[in-house]
Amino acid sequence: DGGITQSPKYLFRKEGQNVTLSCEQNLNHDAMYWYRQDPGQGLRLIYYSQIVNDFQKGDIAEGYSVSREKKESFPLTVTSAQKNPTAFYLCASSLRDRGLGGYTFGSGTRLTVV
Amino acid sequence: GQQVMQIPQYQHVQEGEDFTTYCNSSTTLSNIQWYKQRPGGHPVFLIQLVKSGEVKKQKRLTFQFGEAKKNSSLHITATQTTDVGTYFCAGFGAAGNKLTFGGGTRVLVKP
């Protein structure tokens, strides 16, 4: 079955450490996205990529980095520069043309920094 | 930049009643999408509206896209406990290349 996989589901890290969240899709989608969701809040865009080897900053990119070396993969690194990294992180993918057909989301990674 | 606002933020509904949630964009949209997120889950795509004035139905859910393509609504009839969750609208700007999500309407159903 086609889908989008995020791992791990839960992640605990010490303050000051970098951590990388995995996102893999087998939907043959060109576009991929990373969102952050805080409790009771909406989705805020961190980074997005329309094509391999290219990505753009979203609304809250500071303290995060991404790479897009393969069409299927779009890992997100939460760096020590991110001041409040504890959150629910969602990866999504879509067709490139105006997101037609909707975004497919992964099940998310809950990151807790202690 | 483009902003998408949703009202109400919370909706407490008696089981069996109807309710509507509204979505407004600061700019004209090429399409609008609706998602549902169950508690503890991830957003799931429900529907997409593209044409001005478009109305689409999914069982008890009715979605509408405004004539000016700047607003949308979701109407749920005969609410059930399975409708519990947060409903997000998300707009794709006419000149944009990404969705902008509204803050969501969190729906709680009283049995």
Image: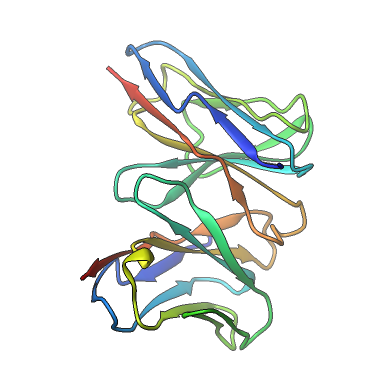
x 41%, y 67%: residue: B5
Q: Quadrant of residue B52?
A: bottom right
In this rendering, position of residue A96 left or right of residue A45: right
Q: Is residue B54 above or below residue A97?
A: below
Total numbered labels: 0
User: Considering depth in this image, is B96 or A27 the residue closer to the camera?
Assistant: A27
Is A72 on the left-hand or right-hand side of A78?
right
Give coordinates of residue A66: x percent, y percent. Answer: 61, 26
User: Which colour style is shown?
Assistant: rainbow
Q: Is residue A73 above or below residue A45?
A: above
Q: Determine whether B32 is above or below B53 in the image.
A: above
- Rendering coords of residue B31 (x, y %): 65, 70
Return the residue nearer the eye: B95 or A68. A68
Q: Which residue is found at the position 49% from the left and 52% from the top?
A: B43
Can you say which quadrant of the picture contains the C terminus of chain B?
Answer: bottom left
Residue B38 percent location from the top left of the image: 39, 54
Asked which quadrant contains residue A106, the reply is top right
Instruction: Name which residue lies at 79% across and 33% down.
Output: A52
> In the image, residue B58 lies at what x, y percent?
55, 77
- Location of residue B28 with respect to A60 vertically, above or below: below
